[in-house]
Image (spheres, helix red, strand yellow):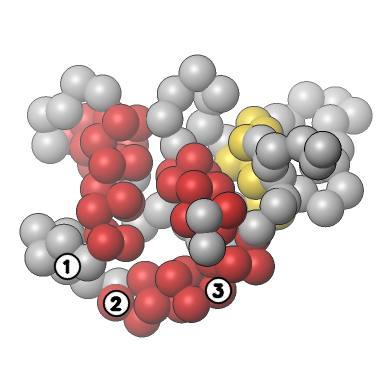
Amino acid sequence: MAERPRRIQRKRTKGWRMPPGAVYVGRPTKWGNPFTVEAAREAGYRDGHAMAVHAYREWLRGNPLYPGHEHLRDHILTHVHDLAGKDLVCWCPLDEPCHADILMELANDC
């Protein structure tokens, strides 16, 4: 049985290498979350990671409360199947919510 794809935290430590076949989905890639943790905190949300991920999920669903970047959203939804079966890499700590989790759900459920 094949291993499920996993989220990997990107690091700057000496010698760290992204695993072969993994895909970096952070900013500024086409997969990046346009909603930042910093903006969520500035808006008064205590858990900026959770709010940024929530906003990303709702934006991908087309929730009218999260307008903008329609061309980017359409591109992500059209090509998310390209991520199926792949490990996804982002800077988010593994114990925090991350938009890569949303991408993995979408990619592996299509």
Residue 54 x/y as whole percent: 27, 42
**What residue is shown with label 1?**
67
Tell me the amino acid under the disc marked 3.
His
Residue 106 x/y as whole percent: 48, 55
Secondary-structure class at tag 1: loop
Rounded to the nearest angstrom, the CA distance separating label 3 from label 1 is 20 Å
Q: Is residue 83 left or right of residue 109?
A: right
70 over 45 or under it: above or below: below
Residue 49 x/y as whole percent: 34, 31
Residue at the extreme bottom: 71
Q: Earlier in the sequence, mark 3 or mark 2?
A: 2
Quadrant (top left, top right, bottom left, bottom right) of the N terminus:
top right
Give 23 or 4, whichever is nearer the viewer.
4
Tell me which residue sits at (11%, 29%) in the image: 44
Closer to us: mark 3 or mark 2? 3
Q: What is the number of callouts on the image?
A: 3
Residue at the extreme front: 1
**What residue is shown with label 3?**
79
Q: Residues within 10 Å of mark 3 (few under 14, many from 20)?
A: few
Tell me which residue sits at (44%, 71%) in the image: 77
**What residue is shown with label 2?**
70
The answer to whether the residue labelled 3 contacts the one labelled 1, judged by CB atoms less than 8 Å apart, is: no
Q: Earlier in the sequence, mark 3 or mark 1?
A: 1
